[in-house]
Amino acid sequence: MGCRVCVASILILSFFTSVCACSSNISSEHSLPPASEAGQQDFMASPAPAQSNPSPSSATSSRKIYLYGESHGVEAIYDKEYELWHCYYTDWNMRHLFIELGYFTAEFLNIWMKADNDEILNTIYNDWQGTQNHNLYVIDFYRKIKSECPETVFHGTDIGHQYQSTGTRYLAFIEDSGLEDTEQYYLAQEAIEQGRIYYDSSDSNIKHTFRENTMAENFIREFDRLDGESVMGIYGSAHTGFGGMDYMTGTVLNMATQLQQRYGDVVNSEDLTWLAQDISPLRTDVININGTDYSALYFGEQDLTGLRDFTRREFWRLESAYDDFKEMNKTGDMLPYNNYPMPIIEGQVFVIDYYLRDGSSYRSYYRSDGNIWNGQPSTEEFSID
């Protein structure tokens, strides 16, 4: 069984309650149990922070890693991440923010933090064209951090995305500054090589397992260099769920699980992807399938420009349609719940239109039968032929 377009596909096995006392304004309907009970909970389609918040004194008695899993490109999630970081920064005096970018990109952001203009940020933003980082929500997120949390230090622990643009420019900057023999130069070269290995590999299994392992290794390197300080990390939820595997191949432990194996309960993780699902349908359409009209709730489109071949996809949920399709033959293609912009429960039918870069499109049909795929609650595609 495969997964066609999994954007942020791992749900968390055990959820850590929201640790920032000033950050939680979530309604009780989204609450989770205390952290001590979270590991015993079943999978949930739309996890959210709990209301109970430990005091800063108890949570910061030793170094901690606070991971937050996101769906990329969602305004509500960026707002929540900024709120969390602002709380850690102002109330707990944390300064180190780990992000899903290459080493050299984070280093450029650190230089920009001290600059009196946005030239560096705008150049990086242009390098992000064709990815999910190329949206105004992301750039506003960084601008707010510079304005309100100016001593923030970014740590990029992903492989060297944009190594041919941002990476090359950073090396040139280091060389022009006469710093070729520094650790910054070495680590930038290493990140560029990681990017080359990933993007030059023709074997999908090799490249994605390499990336997951490398993200964990880079995180460990950066965290161990800090002198006992706590950090916050923002990554796609595929990388932050405890007990998860890499979301493309399902063959190696994801980053958070590797970190948990090394650091134990130092590592805490919370899934923010439910914020992307907390929406109402935008309109009601009618979709005809095999001569029958179905009421279809439309939940909008999702940008896929960061993925190869795709540009976007649109989502509908067919109302009262499950019995009509529950016996239809399944294709084996799985799509985890947290790829959807709305909450999922068992016994539903979904229509998804995919749009490709070559201008073509196709329609897929999924139903929620209660399946678990690669540790994730998932819908499965079925054929209407």
Image: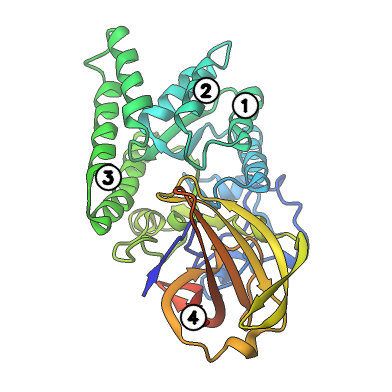
Front disc: 1 or 2? 2
Q: Earlier in the sequence, mark 1 or mark 3?
A: 1
Say which element carries label 2: helix
Q: Which residue is mark 4?
A: 383
Residue 294 in picture, x, y percent from top left: 71, 78
Q: Nearer the viewer, residue 103 or 259?
A: 103
Q: Is residue 245 left or right of residue 111?
A: left
Q: Earlier in the sequence, mark 1 or mark 4?
A: 1
Q: What is the distance, in whole Å, between disc 2 and disc 4 at their CAs?
A: 46 Å
Residue 226 in picture, x, y percent from top left: 39, 34
Residue 286 in picture, x, y percent from top left: 73, 72
Q: Which residue is mark 2?
A: 121
Residue 177 in picture, x, y percent from top left: 32, 8
Q: What is the distance, in whole Å, between disc 1 and disc 3 at their CAs?
A: 30 Å
Q: Earlier in the sequence, mark 1 or mark 2?
A: 2
Front disc: 1 or 3? 3
Please tell me how crowded label 2 is: few (under 14), some (14-19), or many (20+) other residues with Cα within 10 Å.
Answer: some
Task: Name the amino acid type tagged 4.
Answer: Ser
Front disc: 1 or 4? 4
Please tell me how crowded label 1 is: few (under 14), some (14-19), or many (20+) other residues with Cα within 10 Å.
Answer: some
Dots 1, 2 in contact, CB < 8 A: yes
